[in-house]
Image (spheres, helix red, strand yellow):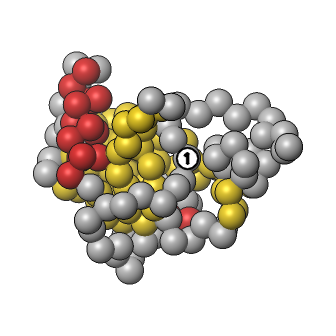
Amino acid sequence: MSDCGDVKKVFVATKTVPVLLEAPIFGIAISDLAAQKIKQFIAADNNDSENYALHVSVVKDGCSGKSYVMKMAPLEEALNNGDKLFSKEGATVAIEKSSYLFVTGSILDYTEALTGSGFVFSNPNVKKTCSCGSSFAV
């Protein structure tokens, strides 16, 4: 059994998700449910989706080497940092510019299950994941 260190994630890690979207060659696709949940979480924090986005970055972490960090953040912050922006139905996802190569071609979805719920990436760049599902390697 592997030791995933001090991995503390709020969102579900990469897994294969049956989504009725065609994966983009460049950029990311956002499912309808993911767009709805982004707007819902932003509104729950008393913010509006015109000024906030789901910010995604890939960091060195866990036993497989990399993991996703996601948070709701001001859109202005993403614009100032030169992050890549993707939108659907009024919801925006900001991919940190240094993380973009790790997620290009991915589909962002949202899953709800008894074991947990959260945003998930169907990421064609992932070569392996750790046994606990919190980190991945490209």
Return the x and y of residue 25 as percentages of the image width and height. Answer: 38, 80
Task: Name, please, the residue furthest toward the left.
Answer: 89
Return the x and y of residue 7 as percentages of the image width and height. Answer: 70, 35
Instruction: Identify which residue is drawn at 80% across, 36% down.
Output: 5
Q: Is residue 67 left or right of residue 74?
A: right
Instruction: Identify which residue is drawn at 69% across, 43% down.
Output: 132
Task: Name, please, the residue furthest toward the front.
Answer: 114
Task: Name, please, the residue furthest toward the bottom.
Answer: 25
Instruction: Identify which residue is drawn at 42% across, 72% down.
Output: 105
Q: Which of the 4 image quarters holds residue 74?
A: top left
Vertical order, 12 against 116 (above or below): below
Towards the viewer: 109 or 6: 109
Q: Is residue 77 visible?
A: no
How many tags in the picture?
A: 1
| Disc 1 residue type (three-letter) | Ala
Q: Secondary structure at mark 1?
A: loop
Return the x and y of residue 49 as percentages of the image width and height. Answer: 20, 37
Towards the viewer: 54 or 6: 6
Q: Is residue 109 visible?
A: yes
Q: Is residue 33 left or right of residue 68?
A: left
Vertical order, 72 against 90 (above or below): above
Quadrant of the rendering where the C terminus is positioned: bottom right
Instruction: Identify which residue is drawn at 26% across, 65% down.
Output: 20
Towards the viewer: 42 or 24: 24
User: Which residue has dot 1 on it?
Assistant: 13
For label 1, the crowd category at 10 Å Cα-Cα, with few meaning under 14, some 14 to 19 and many 20 or more, is many
Quadrant of the rendering where the N terminus is positioned: top right
Return the x and y of residue 123 as percentages of the image width and height. Answer: 50, 65
